[in-house]
Image (cartoon, rainbow, N blue to C red):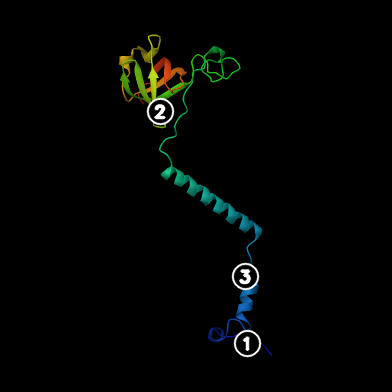
Amino acid sequence: MPSTEPTAEEIVAGPAVTGDLHGEMRRAARSFSRTTRVLAGLVALAAVFALGAWTHAAFGSASTPAPARQAAAPGGQGQPGAQGQGGTRGAAGRGTTGTIDRVDGTKVYVKNAQGGEITVSTTDDTTVGVTQAGKLTDLKPGSTVVVQGQTGDDGTVAARSITQETGR
């Protein structure tokens, strides 16, 4: 006896599963493979990294303060610990970089990258460079300078040289 195929109406009218639908769905479902879980973890890690980069760009500091420049003359002058074994500063001392706030007589007041004010004392032996050799009166407020000299106990720098950098 030949079997007859069901018609479309019979298929639609009949149940999709003749047993337990919940059991059928559980058997048909596959758990995620190890590869899928590793890839999902990497995607999540990349998303967290991107969010951190965006947050830093949006809310981080506008500029990173540059470290103070130091003159490295022959014999290590200009570096801390250059003279003797006691760790004293060399003849040039540490450099100071900042923006001129004002010039008052033989004193130059410089704002450093952190916003602090550095008092720079000068003598007749202090060289001042403004693209070419200059004088204290050539230093203008708002310009960036590099000061080289010895820092005293009170924080005042005894300038050996002051170089005004060109505007950027």
Q: Position of residue 104 (x, y in %)?
A: 31, 19
Dot 1 or dot 3: first in sequence order is 1
Residue located farthest toward the bottom when viewing the structure as drawn: 1
Is residue 76 among the parts visible in the rendering? yes
Q: Residue at x 54, y 12 (%)?
A: 74
- Residue 112 — which label? 2
Q: Which residue is mark 3?
A: 29
Of the image marks 1 and 2, the number of the one nearer the N terminus = 1
> Could you tell me which secondary element the residue under label 2 belongs to?
loop
- Residue 166, given in percent of the width and then of the height, sits at 36, 21
Q: CA distance from mark 1 to mark 3?
A: 32 Å
Q: Amino acid at mark 2?
A: Asn
**Quarter of the rendering containing residue 138:** top left
- Count the marks: 3
Q: Residue furthest right?
A: 1
* Residue beneath disc 1: 4
Q: Position of residue 50 (x, y in %)?
A: 50, 48
Farthest residue to the top: give it: 124
